[in-house]
Image: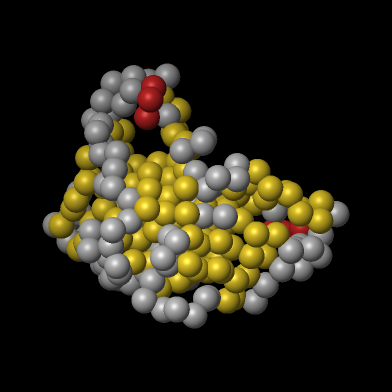
Amino acid sequence: AQTVTQSQPEMSVQEAETVTLSCTYDTSESDYYLFWYKQPPSRQMILVIRQEAYKQQNATENRFSVNFQKAAKSFSLKISDSQLGDAAMYFCAYRSLPRNQFYFGTGTSLTVIP
Amino acid sequence: EAQVTQNPRYLITVTGKKLTVTCSQNMNHEYMSWYRQDPGLGLRQIYYSMNVEVTDKGDVPEGYKVSRKEKRNFPLILESPSPNQTSLYFCASSLRAGQETQYFGPGTRLLVL
């Protein structure tokens, strides 16, 4: 089975600063999707950003961007101009297209300091 | 409003008492899935369904059953719950199996005594 590793259980950032959350994954597949989900205290899972493995260009969604390094199997999330509302648990996730299964990391808890 | 609903949202039960958590989506999605979330373990996929009458095991299927008799519904059944099934459960759906965006339900918090 694929594994997704988030090595930073907790991170903190000053408001308006930039923070990068790390994610690595292990796979032998060539076709897959990668995601970052945000889970605020409400526990709702919210899609932040997604990346198709076949695309070389890094995905960007407003203040959120990724650094996708396919050969290194690395998928980090950069949050620019951090806001108090960004405080949440962030999960990295991998979708296997051949097997139609999802694999999640263990999460990184992000604190935003006013 | 497009959404995934789960019921109940909170449930306390005792060991061995069969229970069902319902999941319904109103987006005509083909792919549906169940996850459990435990501290330090992230989300783990229990079962998924590619379409009506098509289900398959995820990473942690032991102790769970599912059915997909209608496209919109995907109930999770615990025939004989045990305390190690105490968890936060999420249902999710996406348009097709290859369609990457999953929509999650609000979660069901289950406590098995």
Q: Which residue is drawn at 79% across and 63% down?
A: A17
Q: Where is residue A13 in the image (x, y as percent from the top left)?
A: 76, 54
| For residue B83, above or below residue A83 | above
> Residue B1 at x, y = what percent?
47, 70
Residue A44, given in percent of the width and then of the height, sits at 54, 53
Task: Tell me, yes or no, if residue A8 can be seen here.
Answer: yes
Q: Nearer the viewer, residue A13 or B21?
A: A13
Task: Locate residue B43: give its quadrant.
Answer: top left
Q: Is residue B16 left or right of residue A93?
A: left
Who's the residue at 24% across and 33% down the image? B62
Q: Which residue is nearer to you in this view: A99 or A55?
A: A55
For residue A114, above or below residue A79: above
Q: Does the rendering let one see residue B35?
A: no
Measured from the top left, where is residue B78 in percent x and y? 28, 33
Q: Within the image, what quadrant is residue B110 found in?
A: top left
Please state which of residues A30 and B60 is positioned toward the viewer in this rendering. A30
**In front of the other: B84 or B7:** B84
Does residue A24 appear to the left or right of B28 in the view shown? right
Give the answer, above or below, for where A62 lies relative to A88. Answer: below
User: Residue pushed farthest right?
Assistant: A114
Q: In this view, does A34 lie to the left or right of B21?
A: right
How many badges with numbers are in the image?
Answer: 0
Quadrant housing the C terminus of chain A:
bottom right
Residue displayed at 71% across by 68% down: A80
The colour scheme used to paint the residues is secondary structure
At a point 41% along the width and 79% down the height, the residue shown is: A55
Farthest left residue in view: B53
